[in-house]
Image: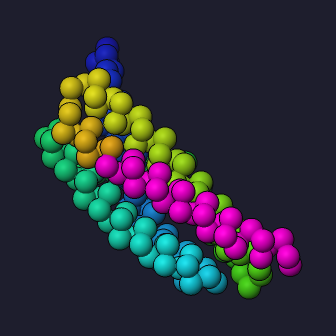
Amino acid sequence: MAKEKTLDDLFLDTLKDIYYAEKKILKALPKMARAASSADLKAAFEKHKDETQGHVERLQQVFELLGKRAQGKTCPAIDGIIEEGEEIMEEFKGTPALDAGLISAAQAVEHYEITRYGTLKRWAEVLGMSDAAKLLEQTLGEESMTDEALTGLADASANEMAKAA
């Protein structure tokens, strides 16, 4: 009979999931930056790429704390979200609605990450992994700030430009 699965197993599984997701996001952000028409949006994607590199490194530290090798596990959710973003880039290329679409795609990514990091932080606390919880909380805060910054860009210009067309 298979070993009973525990919260520890769920934590490790979800950690692998978000590790895979962050690495996929790292590849997608430069494409999104190139596609964006607004200089502010390009800059936001560039900044988040640097932050994402830090998220990957923090996750590697969490794996280390667990005594495990940092490795990803295919995450169909993030693959789908990124694929939707690529469709927006193709279908709205050269239109005033492109940036609004890119922002919506980026926010779908952020919301997925916020959900994962929030859950992992909670589980780390329950499992008594305070060091891991601190690392995860740091990333959770950055993801939330990025989400707010994207909302600011949408409100400042992207949505109005898309509508005006």
In terms of image quadrants, where is residue 158?
bottom right
Q: How many marks?
A: 0
Regarding residue 88, the answer to whether it shows in the image is no
Extent of the magenta region: 138-165
Scheme of image coloration: rainbow
Q: Residue at x 47, y 46 (%)?
A: 114
Quadrant containing the C terminus in the rendered view: bottom right
Q: Looking at this view, is 30 or 68 the one in front?
A: 30
Quadrant that contains the N terminus: top left
Q: Is residue 125 above or below residue 30?
A: above
Q: Is residue 13 above or below residue 9?
A: below
Residue at the image position 44 percent from the left and 76 percent from the top: 46
* Residue 7 higher or lower than 162, as above or below: above
Q: Would residue 12 be visible to someone looking at this image? A: yes
In the rendered image, residue 78, in percent from the top left (x then y), is placed at: 52, 53
Expressed as whole percent of the image width and height from the top left, the position of residue 124 reads 28, 32
What residue is rendered at 42% in x and 38% in y? 118
Is residue 56 magenta-colored?
Answer: no
Name which quarter of the figure residue 128 lies in.
top left
Q: Determine whether 105 is above or below 112 in the image.
A: below
* Left or right, residue 155 beside residue 128: right
Residue shown at the point (34%, 36%) measured from the top left: 121
Magenta segment, principal secondary structure?
Answer: helix
Return the x and y of residue 22 as percentages of the image width and height. Answer: 40, 58
Tell me residue 160's x, y (percent).
Answer: 78, 71
Residue 156 magenta-highlighted: yes
79 or 58: nearer the eye? 58
Side of 104 where 131 appears, left or right = left
